[in-house]
């Protein structure tokens, strides 16, 4: 049976999607709640995994093993890493990587990948259901909320193509990759990852979460 796993880090990112779920069943496992249900006839398990790479990896693996999802959509908010990526811009991650793990380590040791690529068919489907100005490119992940321009610029030096930055995407992608489960990551910009990030985050958090959640729902509606 086909089952779509949807992963968010925070409850605010899951609210809109959860409201659309029918036949909702809450399952507690390993400290978090998994929401099982249906969205327009599609089997869905919605998970809020908590912030950070370790949480994202642990609970993505459980989502695959215990709930047997065969498609993963990771959605949420992020900080901008590029001048063309503004507040409430949408970014689909074609490639994802960690900015706080050495590239040599990723390439030379398992899983010997410098980046993890979203499934092309899922990217295409998302883009069909997203606004025309939705961007596609590199998303970088690390265990820090970037709220200083100096930190952002330092990361940008090593990842010049990065469009946005967040704290879970690459861990979800990494886990899905080693399990050979198709995945896609989409984020909406809540802040510019600079000295105004804390204030921007408060102002744009809910708007960004709802905007990206709407795209995810529209995508699920059109899935076969």
Image (cartoon, helix red, strand yellow):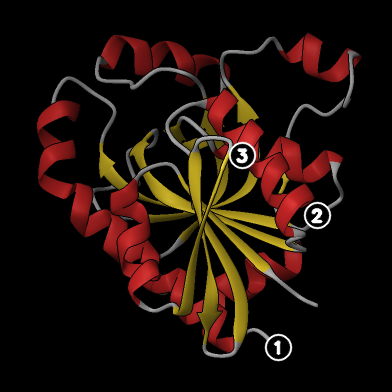
- Residue in the image at 49% along x and 41% along y: 32
Q: Is residue 198 visible?
A: yes
Residue 9 is situated, as x and y percent measured from the top left of the image, at: 43, 41
Instruction: Say few, some or many: other residues with alpha carbon within 10 Å of mark 1 (under 14 / 14 to 19 / 20 or more).
Output: few
Front: mark 2 or 3: 3
Instruction: Say few, some or many: other residues with alpha carbon within 10 Å of mark 2 (under 14 / 14 to 19 / 20 or more).
Output: some
Specify the label residue 181 is tagged with: 2
Residue 170 is situated, as x and y percent measured from the top left of the image, at: 62, 35
- Residue in the image at 44% along x and 77% along y: 21
Quarter holding residue 108: top right
Q: Secondary structure at mark 1?
A: loop
Front: mark 3 or 1: 3
Instruction: Say few, some or many: other residues with alpha carbon within 10 Å of mark 3 (under 14 / 14 to 19 / 20 or more).
Output: many
Quarter holding residue 29: top right
Specify the label residue 59 is tagged with: 3
- Residue in the image at 25% along x and 20% along y: 147
- Residue in the image at 85% along x and 45% along y: 179
Q: Secondary structure at mark 3?
A: helix
Labels 2 and 3: the sequence-earlier one? 3
Q: Nearer the viewer, residue 154 or 48?
A: 48
Labels 3 and 1: the sequence-earlier one? 3
Specify the label residue 224 is tagged with: 1
Q: Nearer the viewer, residue 33 or 180?
A: 33
Labels 2 and 1: the sequence-earlier one? 2
Q: Is residue 161 visible?
A: no
> Where, quadrant-wise, is the C terminus in this rendering?
bottom right
Report how far apart the C-alphas of labels 3 and 1 lie in the structure: 26 Å
Report how far apart the C-alphas of labels 2 and 3 lie in the structure: 14 Å
Residue 99 is situated, as x and y percent measured from the top left of the image, at: 57, 19
Report how far apart the C-alphas of labels 2 and 1 lie in the structure: 17 Å
**Label 2 with label 1: CB-CB less than 8 Å:** no
> Where, quadrant-wise, is the N terminus in this rendering?
bottom right
């Amino acid at each position: 049976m086909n089952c779509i796993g949807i992963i968010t880090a925070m409850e605010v990112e899951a609210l809109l999607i959860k409201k659309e779920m029918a036949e909702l069943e809450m399952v507690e496992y390993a400290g978090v709640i998994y929401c099982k249900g249906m969205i327009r006839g599609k089997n869905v398990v919605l998970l809020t995994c908590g912030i950070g790479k370790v949480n994202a990896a642990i609970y993505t693996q459980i989502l695959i093993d215990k709930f047997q999802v065969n498609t993963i959509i990771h959605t949420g908010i992020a900080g901008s890493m590029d001048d063309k990526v503004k507040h409430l811009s949408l970014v689909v991650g074609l490639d994802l990587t960690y900015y706080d793990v050495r590239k040599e380590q990723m390439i030379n040791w398992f899983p010997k990948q410098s980046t993890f690529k979203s499934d092309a068919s899922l990217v295409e489907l998302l883009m069909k259901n997203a606004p025309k100005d939705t961007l596609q490119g590199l998303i970088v992940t690390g265990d820090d909320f970037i709220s200083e321009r100096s930190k952002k610029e330092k990361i940008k030096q090593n990842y010049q193509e990065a469009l946005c930055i967040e704290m879970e995407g690459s861990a979800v992608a990494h886990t899905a990759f080693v399990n050979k489960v198709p995945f896609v990551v989409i984020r909406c910009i809540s802040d510019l990852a600079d000295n105004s990030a804390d204030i921007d985050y408060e102002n744009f958090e809910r708007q960004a979460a709802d905007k990206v959640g709407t795209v995810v729902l529209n995508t699920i509606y059109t899935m076969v």
